[in-house]
Image: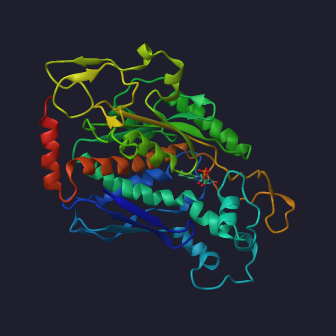
Amino acid sequence: MIRYLTAGESHGPGLTLILEGCPAGLAIDFDEINYELSRRQKGYGRGGRMKIERDKVIPQSGIRHGKTLGTPISFLINNRDWENWQDVMHSVNPMPDDLTGQKAKLAYDNTRPRPGHADLSGAIKFHHDDLRNVLERASARETAAKVALGAIAKQFLGQFGIEFGSHVVRIGSVELEGYDLSLSEIRERSEKSEVRCVDPATEEKMVAVIREAIVKKDSLGGVYEVLVDGLPVGLGGYSQADVRLDGKLAAAVMSIPSVKGVEVGMGFETARRHGSEVHDQIYYDKDGAKHSSKNKGGFYRKTNNAGGLEGGMTNGERLVIRAANKPISTLYQPLDTVDIKTKEAAVAIVERTDNCVTPAHCVVAEAVIALTLFDVFLDKFGHDNMDDIQAAWQRHIDFEI
Ligand SMILES: Cc1cc2nc3c(=O)[nH]c(=O)nc-3n(C[C@H](O)[C@H](O)[C@H](O)COP(=O)(O)O)c2cc1C
């Protein structure tokens, strides 16, 4: 139903994004989009770049007087850092051959690929002998564009009472030990925490392990959780592999740079347990809804090990997606590599880098999950204008089996 594309190098003039398929008549809050962009920039463990950028969307098309037209929406996000990179990244001018100091390093010293990054495979794929031609686009700067697109998806879903929350549950060896909080409490606490952790004592330990890694010139990854309330029953499908919502969500989250694992609900733990301990038993309350969705009717579960998905569809309970991101691969104490020109043993290049980005991952994952849900929502309820979609959604919500 929707299609989107992003373009832009990390240190080029900026990012460009296009969203096709957004229905007409959706009111857009630009401050809210920019707020989402600022959430992505935060988190203990981010590098110097985030102190330079003040990400904001510059609307180009598809929105008139604050409402969508049903035509392609496009935005620009300028890179403030571009000012410092014009010589090295210019689209038209040739690379100057007289750069000195740090600029010379960025311009000419790009032949030692970083283990864990796209550098070497990208260079072989595209026949590049300058790794900057790869790393500029492989950089997760692109995720700013995803967050802006996801903010539109969230604003659409918000019209139907669908709400998001996310938080970090592990950084390196420090893990959050269980929690029992409402979505709004999770949001409130994680938003206040510099590592998006809902428990202040665990947060302190998380900050300490990141600090320790920074001192050792090393990096850390983590595990985080995205939660979505209010999804109607029956988004997605079971009839073909490509309509299963669990597959679409896993693909979206796995596409975030450095994600190495995705779980739905109890995830891998289900494999260790008996069926009787895993499956969420079904109950009925004649007085009505006791579940996360707005659907009328009293079917509900006392547990949510399935994470809100059964048979590739939403089942009316909270959507729970967990993801693991590996440690950042650019290290200030660089790892062994081979110089692609000389074929001699070397150490990897060092770009200015983050040390831990698990908190920022939460925001990016919310965005790609929102875009995936936006797509299946339009598939179920129509896609041209908000009036038709609202009416179809209401009919579905009012339906009782
Ligand atoms: C928000 C965000 C920020 C990131 N920042 C960095 C960074 O500063 N340095 C780095 O080496 N990798 C960073 N990464 C991870 C790389 O983009 C990623 O490891 C790389 O593209 C290789 O892809 P892969 O890890 O999925 O194989 C970041 C990822 C995200 C989501």
Above or below for 303 versus 355: above
Of residues 365 and 83, the one nearer the viewer is 365
Residue extending furthest front?
239
- For the N terminus, the quadrant is bottom left
Above or below for 270 versus 338: above
- For the C terminus, the quadrant is top left
Residue 351 seen in the figure: no
Q: Is residue 340 left or right of residue 262?
A: right
Residue 27 seen in the figure: yes
Above or below for 63 versus 264: below
Residue 22 in picture, x, y percent from top left: 27, 60
Residue extending furthest right?
344
Q: Is residue 123 left or right of residue 228?
A: right
Residue 192 in picture, x, y percent from top left: 43, 40
Q: Is residue 252 left or right of residue 67?
A: right
- Residue at horizontal 85 percent and vertical 67 percent from the top: 342
- Residue at horizontal 59 percent and vertical 46 percent from the top: 45
Residue 302 in picture, x, y percent from top left: 32, 18
